[in-house]
Image (cartoon, grey):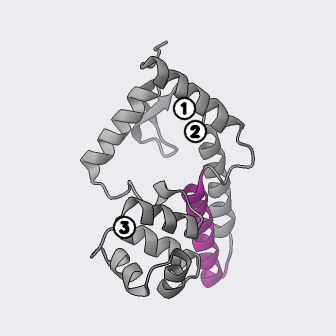
């Protein structure tokens, strides 16, 4: 998704009009419309202001407009930085797949926990007999999970893992390398 598409998606999730978001950030409705349509790109300072007004991490608005090749290179970067390991395995249906483990990315625990919660919510939703209610419940579960990702790490009740990972990252930055096991 582009920056503009992310602004629109999150603004709509917050039930804000373009005019209301513009008022929150000190911009006109026309500017917000131009950002959302991609005719204009917000400058970094404006992007920070918009993210703050939408109560999301600025990363939720940026860094998502990429194709498969860019996605692979971002994974390569995380793989290198966090002691990644590839392995083959089977999914729950017995299909071959490749997975990545990160030896030092302790922040992944909270994502795994939240994803497991999300999948449990989906399972409950799928047991709803009424098709309309099931659809609404599934959309809400997905929106809640997306919100968790958009506001991370503020969505975390405890920031212990964040402190641990930040200290580790700072130490690695200071010495300029990633230790390998």
Q: Residue tagged by mark 3?
A: 42
Q: Label 1: few (<14), some or many (≥20) within 10 Å? A: some
104 displayed left or right of 109: left
37 displayed left or right of 126: left
CB atoms of marks 3 and 1 within 8 Å: no
Q: Nearer the viewer, residue 131 or 163?
A: 163
Residue 175 at x, y percent in the picture: 46, 17
Q: Residue tagged by mark 1?
A: 105
Q: CA distance from mark 3 to mark 1?
A: 31 Å
Q: Which SS class for mark 1? A: loop
Q: Which SS class for mark 2? A: helix
Residue 151, placed above or below residue 138: above
Q: Which SS class for mark 3? A: loop
CB atoms of marks 1 and 2 within 8 Å: yes
Residue that appears at 50% across and 66% down: 49
Displayed quadrant of residue 151:
bottom right
Of marks 2 and 3, which one's residue comes earlier in the chain? Answer: 3
Of marks 3 and 1, which one's residue comes earlier in the chain? Answer: 3
Q: CA distance from mark 1 to mark 2?
A: 6 Å
Q: Residue tagged by mark 2?
A: 108
Q: Label 3: few (<14), some or many (≥20) within 10 Å? A: some
Span highlighted in magenta in the image: 129-152
């Amino acid at each position: 998704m582009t920056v503009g598409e992310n602004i629109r998606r999150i603004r709509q999730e917050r039930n804000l009009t373009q005019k209301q978001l513009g008022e929150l950030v000190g911009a006109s409705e026309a500017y917000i419309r131009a950002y959302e349509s991609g005719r204009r790109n917000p400058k970094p300072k404006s992007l920070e202001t918009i993210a703050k007004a939408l109560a999301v991490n600025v990363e939720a608005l940026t860094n998502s407009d990429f194709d498969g090749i860019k996605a692979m290179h971002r994974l390569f970067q995380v793989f290198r930085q966090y002691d990644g390991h590839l392995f083959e395995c089977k999914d729950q249906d017995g299909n071959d797949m490749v997975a990545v483990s990160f030896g030092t990315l302790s922040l992944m625990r909270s994502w795994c926990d939240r994803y497991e919660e999300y999948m449990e919510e989906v399972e409950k939703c799928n047991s709803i007999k009424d098709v309309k209610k099931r659809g609404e419940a599934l959309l809400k579960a997905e929106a809640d999970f997306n919100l968790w990702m958009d506001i991370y790490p503020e969505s975390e009740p405890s920031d212990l893992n964040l402190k641990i990972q930040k200290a580790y990252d700072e130490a690695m930055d200071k010495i300029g390398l990633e230790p390998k096991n």
